[in-house]
Amino acid sequence: MTIEGTTEGIDLILRQCRLVGAPDLVDIAISDGRIYAISPRLEVLAAQELAIAGRLVSPPFVESHIHLDSALTAGQPRWNQSGTLFEGIDIWRDRKQSLTLEDVKTRAIATLKQQAQQGVLFVRTHADVSEPNLIALQALLEVRDAVKDWITVQVVAFPQDGIYGSDGNDALLETALKLGADAVGGIPHYEMTREDGVQSVHRIFELAHRYDTLIDIHCDEIDDDQSRFLEVVAASATRSGLGARVTASHTTALASYNNAYAMKLMGLLAKSGINFIANPLINITLQGRTDTYPKRRGVTRVKELWQQGLNVSLGHDCVQDPWYSLGTGNMLTVAAMAVHVCQMTGQAEIDACYDMVTMNGAKTLKVESDYGIAVGRPANLIVLDAETPYDAIRRTATVTQVISRGRLLVETQPSVSTWYGN
Ligand SMILES: [Zn+2]
């Protein structure tokens, strides 16, 4: 293929790219921040040319669930010794007393850079709005704006201590939406009573309707098989018509429900069309802490939700914070953990786990019209030192190049070993 006018305006060309699921290698031309042409051989010159040499070129990773406000605080002011969600919340309550705008912004941007260099270009972060000055929220809104030329950030107003946990939390949540949060969150299983939990879900839907925001609720993140707020979320999504604008994060109790109830619930979930986010790194460590043996895995029914045709994505949730002291922001690590914990080892299942850190996440964030490798789309793509998604997950492949908004943002060399034995 020859492009009329040849080199005029072609900023970047990637030679011999292997697209996910496509048999033949292609060249990709990028102009003015967008994908201009995709063809087996583009006879054009460009200002910059990258030899991809058959490596995998993929849409970028989507981090659909992270807490950037608490990232990089592990051990401050103390380590989580029990490893439970609740000790994590207590530690964070102490740490957040000393938050400043600068503190949150510095850690958030450092984490975003760490993510971007590993191929993440879309991020949904939660911002704790249970703190009277809304420092975390204001900082993350400023960060969202400051980084928008190279990474897309969505901010969820998240009432970590519950909407009804103390006076004023409800008003703080509403203020956060007035300040410009993209989504409203909640934590019904942490409210003081079952009734408060149900009421909190209704309040979240009312606020989403009033401020025209998305919804992303930390829902049933507990091993209690009687924690049943997911049905309330699904019913509310169906009745309100908000459907796919709604996301239920974690839903770990679904893994503990009896099968009779879970099967009934699956029908309701399918009808609602809501999105799910599982966080396998975190929930394999946080859950099951009150069990002896057999010890539950505590990760939601990812395989069964996926088999139902529901949209499931995966999140890292935490990077070095009171709930999880490990983590680097690498989405292939997250996908690999899902493959193991959710027993998704069939070929189609491994591929599905790759979708869960790419296009399914884009669907959850509602950015899918600007996402993907197609002519006319914004040129956001990554190159992996791998041939297939399976290969990428198996080897936690290095993301060698990240192209954001049509520009080369970061390059990383894969590690090289030198063998001196026989
Ligand atoms: Zn979370």
Image (cartoon, rainbow, N blue to C red):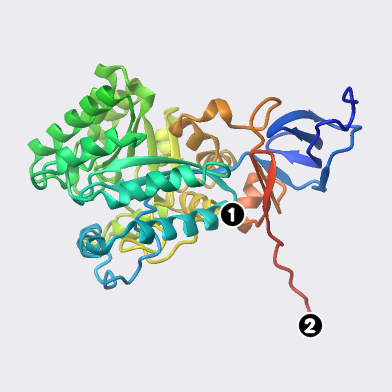
Front: mark 1 or 2: 1
Asked whether, in this view, residue 377 is left or right of residue 273, the answer is right
- Quadrant of the image occupied by residue 37: top right
Query: Amino acid type of disc 2?
Result: Gly
Q: How many numbered marks have been drawn onto this rendered protein structure?
A: 2
- Quadrant of the image occupied by residue 39: top right
Residue lying furthest bottom: 421
- Quadrant of the image occupied by residue 94: bottom left
Q: Earlier in the sequence, mark 1 or mark 2?
A: 1
Could you tell me which residue is drawn at 80 percent across and 46 percent down? 54
Question: In front: 167, or 340?
Answer: 167
Q: Is residue 247 above or below residue 421?
A: above
Residue 118: mark in rendering: 1
Q: Is residue 414 above or below residue 405?
A: below
Could you tell me which residue is drawn at 38 percent across and 48 percent down? 140
Q: Is residue 34 above or below residue 52?
A: above
Residue identified by numbered label 2: 421
Locate the C terminus by quadrant. bottom right
Residue 225: x percent and y percent?
19, 44
Could you tell me which residue is drawn at 53 percent across and 28 percent down? 368
SS class of the residue under badge 1?
Answer: loop
- The answer to whether one can see residue 273 in this image is no
Q: Residues within 10 Å of mark 2 (few under 14, many from 20)?
A: few
Query: Amino acid type of disc 1?
Result: Gln
SS class of the residue under badge 2?
Answer: loop
Q: Residues within 10 Å of mark 1 (few under 14, many from 20)?
A: many
